[in-house]
Image (tube, coloured by chain):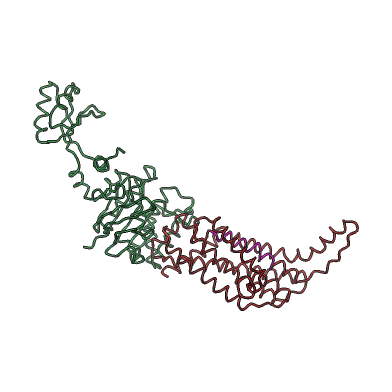
Chain colours: A red, B green
Amino acid sequence: MRGFGAFLIKELREIARTWRIWVLPGIVLFFAISGPPLAKITPELLGSFVAEQPGVVIQFPDPTYVDAYLQWTKNLQQIVLFAVIIMFGGVISAEKRSGTAALALTKPLSRTAFVLAKFVSQTALLAVTVVVGALATWGLTYAVFAEAPLAPLAQATATWLALGVMILALMVALSAAIDSQAGAAGLGFLGFIALSIATLWSPAVEHSPAGLLGAPTNLVMGKPVTLGWPLATTFALTAVFVLVAVAVFRRREL
Amino acid sequence: MTAAIEIAGLTKVYGEKRALDGVDLNVSAGSVFGFLGPNGAGKTTTLRILTGLARPSGGEARVFGRDVVSATNEVRADIGFLPDVPGYYEWMTAPEFLRFAGSLFGLGGRVLDERVEALLDLAGLAGVRTKVGGYSRGMKQRLGVAQALINAPKLLMLDEPTSALDPIGRKEVLDMIGSLGGRTTVFFSTHILSDVERVCDTVAILHEGRVVTQAPIGELKSRYGTSKLVVGVTAGADALAARLAAEPWATEVSRRENGALEITVADLAEARRAVPAAVAAVGVGLTRFESGEVSLEEVFVDLVGVER
């Protein structure tokens, strides 16, 4: 694993000094900040729209902190996961295409260290971004609704993060194998669709990462959730994807 | 002394194409070695195998006695490498890039500070504060040579370091390479013959994936170069040319731009006796009579068999 520390420092500095610091954090913070006020005014907006329709009467319940938390989990499960798939589709192949990988890897930097530093740094970016987003959602929810229990939000966010890191590991593996960022992202979307379809089959929900797709929403709504197998299989698949990324990248010619 | 590079029977196959077809090469430690060949001859492929970026299909390659396939990190610790198109993290400045490169070799503290400062001076980039993304091609190549020297390598490998540079940038990079002679082994691939003549002491010529010759430049010229004579006369050069062309020892007679005759000869001793006699017989005045220098380009064309 020679060169891991030096390359990890480079990766972290690259995140801080390039577009990477703006895109994913920007998306997450936008939805974290806009979610609670949107949850507050959505019933009023819908009510005013319905009031303009003659003969239609719909009663909307008063919004609560749960609605704000649901906005957060819904955005994590869709938009943020899509952003992860698109952004990280080129996490390794971009360095191969630009020639920076060739320059770095002709020094005593092992390919294993190269891949692991990529995974660790991007996991740190994702984790810090999501934790900061969750804290923003929590603070704004309290400001808007005067009630914001931390536990359901923390559990939902942590559960999603496990799934998000697994998708990130999948993208690292795909990016190690495929030179095209669009190609890797396309396969990543296929993986996401397969996971979504698996949620229709209860054994998959109980025993695979598919169970984590709906878990954040259920946790926020206070519904019972079984997390043991889904988390265990998610961690195992994360490790498998990283190992595959290392094995594939070690065999590739640059 | 262990050779810097030993290559035996090296092959590389891409599908149907044999990029390298049994390359044999030996680079002595301390030499400035020119690896010459036309585009597509296999120079970059050879360098990619030596640096571990590609795997050979057959044969073996060693750097300071270590196999490049099984001892990748040990080999890389001893080399500095500049690819033909170096890719940089364009958000870094030159000092930042050199520090990053040094950190991959485990360098740090005062040693790294001193090397970064010295290499920035050598590359003419001291005081440049802009990010690498804003550099000219010449600045990038000079930074490329500097980063390849950050570990004080025993072997410096440069892939076409001057091919895309303007004359000033080319001179600057060649001066940098020339200044390294005697301090480290330099293995320098190029298709520009004059660059090799200018900085290298030994040369190998690669053609269609095979090394067609390897020797010190002087020996190569004398081994493959044909003897030439240059003759200048006051008038009647055409009549003299016609007379000389009929001689059995003259294989070719041509006119240079300045009007002098360039005679390619098969028997130099006989030619030296016969030319003054021919000048006298034609009845013209002799203004110049000297040996013509054989260029590496002529050797190259002779070996590769293609006019370039």
**Quarter residue B239 falls in:** top left
Residue drawn at the location 86% of the way across and 66% of the way down: A59
Q: Position of residue A146 (x, y in %)?
A: 77, 73
Question: Looking at the image, which is closer to me, B170 or B160?
Answer: B160
Main SS category, magenta section: helix
Q: Position of residue B120 (x, y in %)?
A: 39, 56
Number of numbered labels in the structure image: 0
Q: Position of residue A175 (x, y in %)?
A: 51, 60
Residue A8 visible from this viewpoint: no
Residue A78 visible from this viewpoint: yes
| Residue A76 is covered by the magenta coloring | yes
With A4 as the anchor, is B219 left or right in this view?
left
| Residue A69 is covered by the magenta coloring | no
Say which quadrant the N terminus of chain B sits in.
Answer: bottom left
**Quarter residue A55 falls in:** bottom right
Q: Which residues are magenta?
A: A73-89
With B266 as the anchor, is A127 left or right in this view?
right
Q: Position of residue A158 (x, y in %)?
A: 63, 73
With B192 as the anchor, is A9 left or right in this view?
right
With B131 as the anchor, is B290 left or right in this view?
left
Say which quadrant the C terminus of chain B sits in.
Answer: top left
Residue A175, compared with residue A65, is above or below; it is above
